[in-house]
Image (cartoon, rainbow, N blue to C red):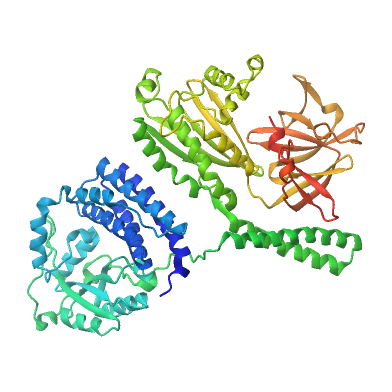
Amino acid sequence: MEMSQYLEVFIEESREHIQSLNENVLLLEKSPDDLQIVNEIFRSAHTLKGMSATMGYEDLANLTHKMENVLDAIRNGKLSVTPDIIDVIFTAVDHLEAMMESVANGGDGKMDVSGTIARLEAAEQGSAGEKKAEKEASAATAEKAETEEDEFDQYEQAVIVQSEEQGYSCYQFTVTLRSDCLLKAARVFMVFDILEKCGEIIHSDPPADQLEEEQFDNEFKVTLISKEDREEIRQKICKVSEIEDVKASTVTLSKPESGQHLETAEPEKPAAEEKKQAAPDIAEKQPQKPAKKHPQKQKHTTKTIRVNIERLDNLLNLFEELVIDRGRLEQIAKEVNHPELNETVERMSRISGDLQTIILNMRMVPVETVFNRFPRLVRQLARELHKKMDLDIIGAETELDRTVIDEIGDPLVHLIRNSCDHGIEQPEERKRAGKPETGTITLKAYHSGNHVFIEIEDDGAGINREKVLEKAIEKGIVKKEEAGSLTDSQIYNLIFESGFSTADHVSDISGRGVGLDVVKSTIQSLGGSISVHSAEGRGSVFTIQLPLTLSIISVMLVEIGTEKYAVPLSSIVETAIIKKGEILKAHHQKVIDFRGKVVPLVFLNEIFEVPDAKQNDEYVSVLIVRKGEKLAAFVVDAFIGQQEIVLKSLGNYLTNVFAISGATILGNGQVALIIDSNALIK
């Protein structure tokens, strides 16, 4: 069987399972007694093992199998969750991730993990020695019922006990499908159909929804309450094609008394005559009938398809050309003013608008996909640095273009490591400063206009202004005579210079002066910017500004002199026309009173040095724009109207043009510059 065609799907799904392992092991550390979390981890590991074995990556499968054994011991109460156990599981997950990346890069996925396997085996054997004899004894009685009371919840246990009192029996059937079975879900359905005709299904392992989605190997268990003979039911199941084996056992749960657990046993096989004795129906005695767990009746999954990002890029590029032609067509329709042409163009605009929304939404991904890796990183750094740290994540649902998401992960890793190492102090220092022993790092994402802002804030020591200035002078980044004229903000931003570091010694985490300069260059290459604000002794905030999307946006077209500019509609609060007499002065700045707020005026003709701008009109046209909580009023000559435009970059030669984020081609072939309103609001 040719596996290469499935490789891409295998890599994607394996990454998802590894991310799930990371998240759930972190949760398990906080809630070590929560078996539901253990089951989630076990399911992810089990699926990953099966996929790896199928694809032929034996090292991956073996390591996952050893990890499964430890998880199984935890699940069965034979092993308790300790920091050492969590550490070894995390180490195993790290190795799995490294092997997966090897596969993704065209490698064979092989890796020497003998040390980690030895640690996993030691962990598994740690508290299992005394259970060994018990395991061997139980193997000899394999024909007896294998089900323990832990398999059933309280309601199911009550149903089993009451059914026994009324002459019913509870059976568990372990069905093994042939290894070459093609339609596992169909065979499961046929088995369930037979069993439902014989009695009431009260439990299945795995649950019905997983059986329906074929999320199991070749074996599943079904627990049934019935009056029919156990062997007869077993024979009916055996008649289903592609079934290799069916084992049947009888489940008996005694009523729990004080200090006693429910017990599982297999009584003598009751005679057929006893089975046929009249007995009150269970439903009459019980207020609630056992829920049927039919695999065909639980549909909660969302159907998805994986598409290569290059195909979406090509689709978007073609659509961008269509948007430019649409703008040209709309302009021709206005000039010709033919009713049928106008109607057709209007309908085409509406349909292409819907298509545009769909294409852009297909490319948008929540930043959660990047943020999810950081709780694990902070935990690891806290242990390495012997600090106490918490990570708070806010706004993980904020969406960004996929191309931006792919690039933003590494810069955020550098910034979080920086906050952990340089920002958060040791617990003793924090105590002396009157702070809680546990430091907090906050990772926050939010929309503002046509941009997404990501903030990394810590409540640590802050940036030592004098130390930064001293290092900058020492390295020749700043001249001594210029140092006195620099503002706090300019000094703090010196930490992004190449080779700059305030660390007193080099460690595995930081100190070589590599990291923050790479962060800055990466973010600038995405059309974004980064800044830092700090208060010594109270903490620091790194703010990253990124474009929401790299393609199509809604804008307000305005005129300044003979030139046309575009302002992103998402930044605009409203448009207004004011009298010149309403313009006031405050702190050498022209302002207006806008709904009780003092809003500064920004004269775009002065900013962009536009000649022939109207100066002597009695009225002034303004755009009220917002950046977070701050407002500003952009003064323009005239409003042209709203339009969908394609955002084009200015190219490599014009990367640092102030307050211009790109350009667009209008319907008449003219070029309009797109204003970055966030750069003009201070």
Residue 656: x %, y % from top left: 71, 37
Q: Nearer the viewer, residue 559 or 182?
A: 182
Q: Is residue 285 above or below residue 491?
A: below
Residue located at (40% from left, 60% from top): 108
Residue located at (80% from left, 47% from top): 672
Describe residue 605's horizontal placement relative to residue 401 as left or right. Answer: right
Q: Is residue 59 above or below residue 199?
A: above
Image quadrant in which the N terminus is located: bottom left
Residue 177: x %, y % from top left: 28, 76
Whether residue 258 is visible? no
Q: Is residue 401 above or below residue 56?
A: above
Image quadrant in which the C terminus is located: top right
Residue 254: x %, y % from top left: 11, 62
Whether residue 133 is visible? yes
Residue 486: x %, y % from top left: 65, 19
Residue located at (80% from left, 68% from top): 344
> Quadrant of residue 307 in the image?
bottom right
Describe residue 201's horizontal placement relative to residue 645 as left or right. Answer: left
Describe residue 407's horizontal placement relative to residue 634 as left or right. Answer: left
Q: How many marks?
A: 0
Q: Nearer the viewer, residue 227 or 218?
A: 218
Q: Is residue 665 above or below residue 511?
A: below
Residue located at (44% from left, 42% from top): 374
> Quadrant of residue 490 in the image?
top right
